Amino acid sequence: MPDFTEVYREYFAGVCRYVLALCGDPSLAEEITQETFFRSLAAIDGFRGDCPLFAWLCRIARNCWLDHCREHRRRGEEPPEGHVPSAEETYLRREEARAALAGLDRLAEPYGEVLRLRALGGLSFRDIGAAYGKNETWARVTCFRARQRLKEEME
């Protein structure tokens, strides 16, 4: 079992950047990141090591974010004030997002996850490479190939 204090120190900032890319709200991102580490502490004994620890933490973070969204909808809370998109804009954005996410899900690993970490998580190539036990160049090449494959999927 890894030393959890060290895991927290090493990965908190990266996980928080990933969550910030998902939610766009710095205070909410920090709250969800805290929940992520709380859940991961409870589940650390179940970590089998078949993926990088950082990727495992990001999956937990994504699940925390989705749980937050479900709870928000369940309570019937209004979205934050700001630009209210038209029905057409909303539909087009959803369709584009669905197509992109479906394309990401169809990409073989590590392409899908590397692209998620870069595009959604805002992680540096160095951090992505480190998460996979590889170097920055590997992350750059893998991300480039992932984008190419996603473009092909979308066409």
Image: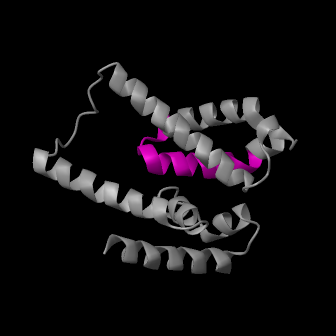
Quarter of the view holding residue 12: top right
Q: Main secondary structure of the magenta part?
A: helix
Give percent across and percent down for residue 54.
69, 52
What residue is at 34 percent from the left and 26 percent from the top?
A: 73
Q: Is residue 76 visible?
A: yes
What residue is at 80 percent from the left and 47 percent from the top?
A: 48
What residue is at 25 percent from the left and 55 percent from the top?
A: 95
144, above or below 112, in the image: below
Give percent across and percent down for residue 70.
41, 29
Q: Quadrant of the C terminus?
A: bottom left
Give percent across and percent down for residue 13.
64, 49
Give percent across and percent down for residue 92.
19, 55
Q: Quadrant of the N terminus?
A: top right
Q: How many marks?
A: 0
- In the image shown, does 79 or 63 lie closer to the viewer? 63
Verify whether residue 13 appears in magenta: yes
The magenta-colored residue range is 9-28
Quarter of the view holding residue 113: bottom right
User: Relative to residue 101, is residue 136 drawn left or right?
Assistant: right
User: Relative to residue 111, is residue 43 drawn left or right?
Assistant: right
66, above or below 149, in the image: above
Q: Is residue 86 visible?
A: no
51, above or below 20, in the image: below
What residue is at 60 percent from the left and 65 percent from the top?
A: 109
Give the residue at the far top of this rendering: 75
Identify the colour scheme used.
Answer: one colour
Verify whether residue 97 appears in magenta: no
User: Relative to residue 136, is residue 88 drawn left or right?
Assistant: left
Quarter of the view holding residue 142: bottom right
